[in-house]
Image (cartoon, rainbow, N blue to C red):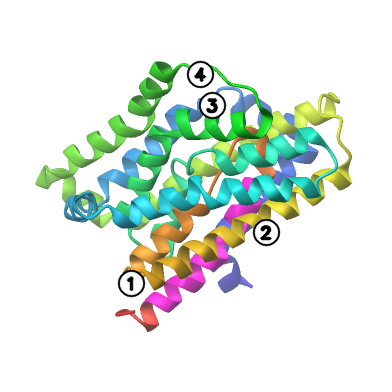
């Protein structure tokens, strides 16, 4: 049991934390009310960039095809699948919600973390995050306009400013810190510890969202049956797995190396929104187990 908990500690903490937020949100609310998600994500990205080899980032920038392919899957087949699968849902709001979940950018931090956990190319996942986030103001709104027939007005300048503050600036500072030998050495030495800290930071964001969702459900502001929500969650999990397998198999057919295949699989399939919290939790549960399996495959077949 101790060995099992040592291997799957994050799954246990994630499930326990979400259950606590669902049944006893008042226990967590004093802490989550003070939490600023953007600052937490920025810190997690800084830690990942600080421990990321600059050489691998430059290599990915020079050969961006895998990242572009992941972005194409993320913004093409995945939203199309969400649009088609939405007709299985009984409520129009759920159908639009499913499309929105599949049409948003890649997750800002967890895609890199779970790519690292599986032994994949973190730099590729990071570039996918940048590409999908930078183009979300155009692609996401285009999908919504196509599905609903209405145009959404977004402040592109505000979105780009947020992108710079939350993504570009932390990554840039992390890479600048890495250029100094005195700062690079502790980053390399403490990389496993920083990976754990980054996952705990993601957990903090999940718990904050869990408390918010629990409060909304308790207030009756989400007039949907539990059965409809459960079916939607199952449908989202199935779409996520289809996207992940599509990214993995197509990358193999395109002859990307194995670490890059892993990065494409996770970065093209991971999506999240605060309203889709329990879908995101399901993604992380599945992806943790998948990452461990892929990491095992990487160790047993390092040249694949």
Q: What element carries label 4?
A: loop
Answer whether labels 1 and 3 touch (C-beta < 8 Å): no
Nearer to us: label 2 or label 4: 4
Distance of label 2 from label 3 (alpha carbons): 31 Å
Relative horizontal placement of residue 228, taking residue 184 as reference (left or right): right
Mark 3 highlights which residue? 35
Q: Is residue 222 above or below residue 154?
A: below
Q: Magenta part of the protein: which range?
A: 279-298
* Residue 99: image location, x then y, percent: 65, 40
Q: Say if residue 196 shows up in the picture.
A: no
183 or 170: which is nearer to us? 170
Residue in view at x 34 percent, y 66 percent: 259
Nearer to us: label 4 or label 3: 4
Relative horizontal placement of residue 241, taking residue 71 as reference (left or right): right
| Lower position in the chain sequence, tag 2 or tag 4 | 4
Mark 4 highlights which residue? 154
Quarter of the view holding residue 30: top right
| Lower position in the chain sequence, tag 1 or tag 4 | 4
Answer whether labels 1 and 2 touch (C-beta < 8 Å): no
């Amino acid at each position: 049991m101790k060995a099992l908990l040592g291997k799957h500690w994050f799954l246990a903490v994630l499930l326990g934390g979400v259950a606590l937020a669902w049944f006893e949100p008042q226990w967590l609310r004093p802490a989550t009310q003070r939490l600023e998600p953007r600052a937490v994500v920025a810190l997690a990205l800084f830690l990942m960039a600080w421990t990321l080899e600059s050489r691998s980032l430059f290599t990915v920038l020079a050969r961006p095809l895998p990242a572009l392919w992941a972005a194409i899957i993320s913004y093409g087949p995945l939203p199309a699948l969400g649009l088609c699968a939405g007709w299985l849902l009984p409520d129009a709001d759920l159908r639009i919600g499913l499309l929105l979940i599949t049409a948003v950018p890649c997750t800002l931090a967890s895609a890199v973390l779970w790519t690292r956990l599986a032994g994949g190319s973190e730099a590729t996942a990071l570039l996918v995050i940048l590409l999908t986030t930078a183009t979300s103001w155009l692609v996401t709104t285009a999908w919504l306009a196509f599905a609903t027939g209405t145009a959404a007005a977004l402040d592109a300048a505000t979105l780009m400013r947020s992108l710079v503050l939350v993504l570009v600036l932390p990554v840039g500072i992390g890479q600048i810190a890495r250029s100094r030998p005195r700062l690079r050495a502790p980053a390399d030495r403490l990389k496993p510890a920083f990976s754990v800290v980054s996952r705990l930071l993601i957990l903090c964001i999940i718990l904050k969202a869990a408390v918010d969702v629990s409060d909304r459900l308790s207030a009756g502001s989400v007039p949907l049956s539990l059965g409809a929500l459960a079916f939607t969650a199952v449908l989202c999990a199935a779409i996520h797995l289809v996207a992940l397998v599509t990214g993995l198999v197509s990358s193999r057919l395109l002859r990307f190396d194995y670490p890059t295949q892993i990065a494409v699989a996770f970065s093209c399939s991971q999506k999240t929104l605060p309203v889709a919290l329990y879908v995101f939790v399901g993604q992380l549960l599945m992806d943790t187990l998948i990452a461990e399996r892929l990491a095992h495959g990487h160790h047993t077949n390092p040249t694949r």
